[in-house]
Image (cartoon, grey):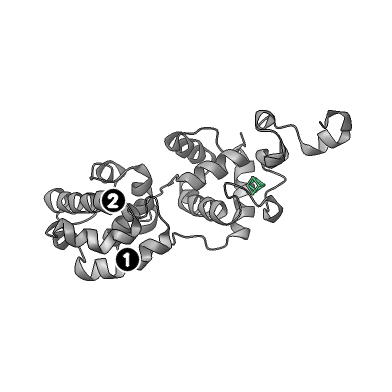
């Protein structure tokens, strides 16, 4: 695993490749970001951004959404997929905001994860972007990219959140997550475009042969350069 100094250098390089990384969800206040983030499960931010203008026009805040008919929400969010479950979450979340938080989105992790449909990833998105409270959302892109580079070593988003959090100061957490998400979407895809990546030299996955090595030999971390010095080892 990388140490804090190496991690900061890697993130600085990635930030030059993806300047001004930020959430791609469109929102104007914490409530809209919370709704948009719940809707973003299993779909793209662009698809969410297509449905939220009409959704927020009809239900601009928690008191309004808490009174919605489930069928009204389902029609409006259908294009994001899993629309029945998402509508149920939105309705229950809005009702909980009205019942326990005066209709406002709370600004603490503890209170956010108590809301229906809200896990740590969603809570971290809202904390980091809407409240500027350090938050480190770990989605599938952060999970994949952080493990490949060697910034983290776990399949668990919560463990990766802890490992990244120890490598970087809190004021860097949200930008780090946004940067790793963009890198995962644009470059370090499931089939990575390593020839376009600015952290090839620092990346454990690339240095151990990436997708060109058989799966059972990946992760041994022997540099490509070392293998080239010993051609007999190339099989
Ligand atoms: S070198 Fe390849 S695997 Fe490593 S971070 Fe870059 S794109 Fe991902």
Relative height, residue 152 to residue 128 (above, below): above
Q: Residue at x 58, y 50 (%)?
A: 189
**Label 2 belongs to which residue?**
107
Q: Residue at x 88, y 34 (%)?
A: 229
Residue 25 location, x and y as percent?
39, 62
Q: From the viewer's perspective, tell me whether residue 173 is left or right of residue 216.
A: left
Quarter containing the C terminus? top right
Q: Is residue 169 visible?
A: no
| CB at disc 1 and ligand 1 closer than 8 Å | no
Q: Residue at x 36, y 67 (%)?
A: 50
Q: From the viewer's perspective, tell me whether residue 156 is left or right of residue 233.
A: left
Relative height, residue 202 to residue 66 (above, below): above
Determine crowd level at label 1: few under 14, some 14-19, many 20+ residues with C-alpha closer than 10 A: some
Say which element carries label 1.
Answer: helix
Residue 119 location, x and y as percent?
32, 43
Q: From the viewer's perspective, tell me whether residue 61 is left or right of residue 121.
A: left
Q: Is residue 209 visible?
A: yes
The numbered mark, 1 or 2, whose residue comes first in the sequence reads 1
Relative height, residue 64 to residue 84 (above, below): below
């Amino acid at each position: 695993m990388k140490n804090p100094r190496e991690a900061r250098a890697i993130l600085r390089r990635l930030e030059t490749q993806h300047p001004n990384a930020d959430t791609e969800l469109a929102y104007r206040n914490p409530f809209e970001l919370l709704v948009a983030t719940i809707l973003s499960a299993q779909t793209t931010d662009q698809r969410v951004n297509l449905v939220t203008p009409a959704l927020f026009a009809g239900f601009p805040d928690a008191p309004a959404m808490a009174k919605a008919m489930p069928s009204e929400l389902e029609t409006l969010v259908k294009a994001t997929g899993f629309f029945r479950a998402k509508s149920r979450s939105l309705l229950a979340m809005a009702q909980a905001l009205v019942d326990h938080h005066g209709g406002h989105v709370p600004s603490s992790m503890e209170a956010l994860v108590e809301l229906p449909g809200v896990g740590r990833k969603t809570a971290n998105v809202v904390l980091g972007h809407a409240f500027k409270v350090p938050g480190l959302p770990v989605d599938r892109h952060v999970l994949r990219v952080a493990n490949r580079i060697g910034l983290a070593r776990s399949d668990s988003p919560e463990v990766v959140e802890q490992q990244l959090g120890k490598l970087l100061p809190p004021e860097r957490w949200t930008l780090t997550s946004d940067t790793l998400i963009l890198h995962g979407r644009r470059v370090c895809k499931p089939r990575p475009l390593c020839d376009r990546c600015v952290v090839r030299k620092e990346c454990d996955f690339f240095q151990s042969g990436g997708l060109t090595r058989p799966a059972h030999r990946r992760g041994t971390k022997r540099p490509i350069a070392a293998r080239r010095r010993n051609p007999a080892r190339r099989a």
